[in-house]
Image (cartoon, rainbow, N blue to C red):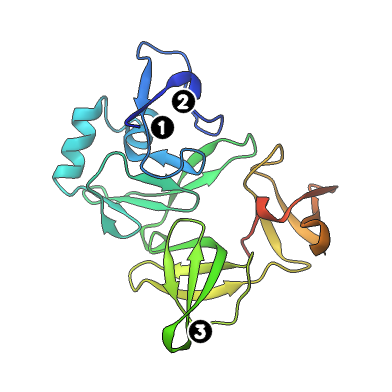
Amino acid sequence: MAHLKRQEIPKSWPVPRKAKTTYVVSPNFSKNDGMPLLVVLRDVLKVAENRKEVKKILHEKGLLKNAIVAHDEKNTLVLFDTITFVQSKKSYRMIIGENGKFELKEIKENEAGKKIAKIVDKKMLRGKKVQINLSDGRNVLSNEKCGMGDSVVIDLKNKKIEKILPLKEKAKVLIFEGKHAGEEGIVEEIIKEKKMIKLKSNENEISVLIKQVMAID
């Protein structure tokens, strides 16, 4: 599907559902996991007024997404992805605010070369190589000791895992789905049989599904 009706836009997108246009461009990755670059540049950062201007920026190789030149305005920016404007050298990271909506946070240029992603699957390949599948659609070969649900810090330039962030008690986590999306907390207990986590967030104790949280420290 090339376009979405505005009424179908996920609540996590910080764009109005009612506007002069009936449709918005559909991302090339899950619409619930992020936003297309067109929406990010035109509607969120407002560095372009229309699709033509966005395509001009991309055609002139003016934007890096995760340290790689971006070409497609439908390319999806997901949680913790980074973008850098080549000319101004301004960099932003996709985060999720406490209102549960995506935001673009300005960061230092040297911070744009790293990002966090969650491990969603592991596979053993031939030659005893381990393939780690990440929440942003990325697949990485690594012998790092890690488990499902842990997070990794990725060196985007070298496309390697720099650090493992285990999902364990006392770990700092971000809730990225559900009614508590955007809240951060400290893990108090992991209840594996119920696939739940108890954590403390802003002095409140809450329980969420393991699949809704990501270790960030």
* 209 shown above or below 23: below
Q: Pointer 1: what residue?
A: 44
- What's the CA distance linking mark 3 and mark 2? 41 Å
Q: Indicate the amino acid at tag 1.
A: Val
Residue at point 43%, 53% (across, down)? 81
Q: Pointer 2: what residue?
A: 15
- Quarter occupied by the N terminus: top left
Whether residue 214 is visible to the viewer of this picture, yes or no, is: yes
The x and y percentages for residue 17 are 48, 18
Residue neighbourhood size for the residue with mark 3, other residues' Cα within 10 Å, grouped as few (<14), some (14–19), many (≥20):
few
In contact (CB < 8 Å): disc 2 and disc 1: yes
Q: Nearer the viewer, mark 2 or mark 1?
A: 2
- What's the CA distance linking mark 3 and mark 1? 39 Å
Which mark sits nearer the N-terminus, 3 or 2?
2
Q: In the rendering, which numbered label is found on residue 143?
A: 3
The x and y percentages for residue 82 are 40, 53
* 47 shown above or below 18: below
Q: Nearer the viewer, mark 3 or mark 2?
A: 3
Q: Nearer the viewer, mark 3 or mark 1?
A: 3
Q: Indicate the amino acid at tag 2.
A: Val
Residue at point 52%, 74% (across, down)? 123
* 160 shown above or below 57: below
